[in-house]
Image (cartoon, rainbow, N blue to C red):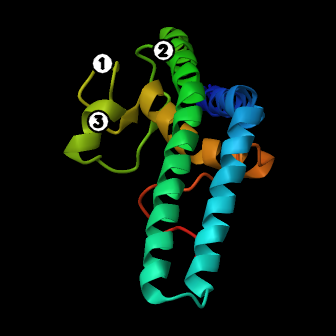
Amino acid sequence: MIKWIFVVIYSAVTAILSEFLSYILVYRRTAFKDKLEAHEKSKMKIERIKQGTTKPGLREKKLASENAILEETQQALQMEKMKGTVVVSVLMFVLGGIFNQFFDGVVLARLPFQPISIVKNFSHRHILGDDYQEVGNSFLFMLCSLSIKPTISRILKLNPEIPSAMPTMFQNK
């Protein structure tokens, strides 16, 4: 029987549910929208200061004060988002516990290779035997969630891109 399809469908449904809850709890609220707007205005003001023709000493002072404001708005955005993330995380833990009851000890897939030692115990979790190529529900659900949730998030475009404090190599310039 093809039990892994149920895991993929379950992963997609939980991803859609978590994105919907994030939208309801965070992104559609006016407090979040106001903070996001203030953040964008602060970014534009910094760009204007950088392109301005004011004296270098005055420009540095203005830039430092606007950077402080930008950091404050960014922190406020992250705090707003954290509230919804906590609720979604608790819900995902509960749904994950319910899901584990259905597939506890069931082999859902088989890897074509021997996993490395870090992944070995997690991929073979709750499965009897020593064949580490067998995959349980936790590992398969994690892989599906890691691939499906970002895809659904981008397709639905529910959440705006929130800038992070540290730049990453995948950030648009």
Residue 164 visible to the viewer? no
Q: Which one is earlier in the sequence, the residue at label 2 or at label 3? A: 2
Q: Position of residue 152 (x, y in %)?
A: 71, 44
Above or below for 35 versus 25: below
Q: Which residue is mark 1?
A: 128
* Left or right of 17 on screen, residue 112: left
- Taking the spot 29% from the left edge, 46% from the top edge, the residue there is 115
Residue 125 occupies quadrant: top left
Above or below for 17 versus 68: above
Above or below for 126 versus 130: above
Q: Amino acid at mark 3?
A: Tyr
- Taking the spot 77% from the left edge, 34% from the top edge, the residue there is 30
In the rendered image, the residue lying farthest to the left is 117
* Tag in front: 2 or 3: 2
Q: Position of residue 144 (x, y in %)?
A: 56, 40
* Left or right of 37 on screen, residue 52: left
Quadrant occupied by the N terminus: top right
Q: Which residue is mark 3?
A: 132
Quadrant occupied by the C terminus: bottom right
* Left or right of 123 on screen, residue 74: right
Q: Secondary structure at mark 1?
A: loop
Question: What is the C-alpha distance between the residues marked 2 and 3?
Answer: 19 Å
Residue 121 visible to the viewer? yes
Q: Amino acid at mark 2?
A: Asn
Residue toward you, 51 or 152 = 51
Above or below for 93 versus 35: above
Q: Which residue is mark 2?
A: 100
Q: Position of residue 51 (x, y in %)?
A: 61, 86
Evaluate if marks 3 and 1 touch, with contact meaning CB atoms under 8 Å apart. Answer: no
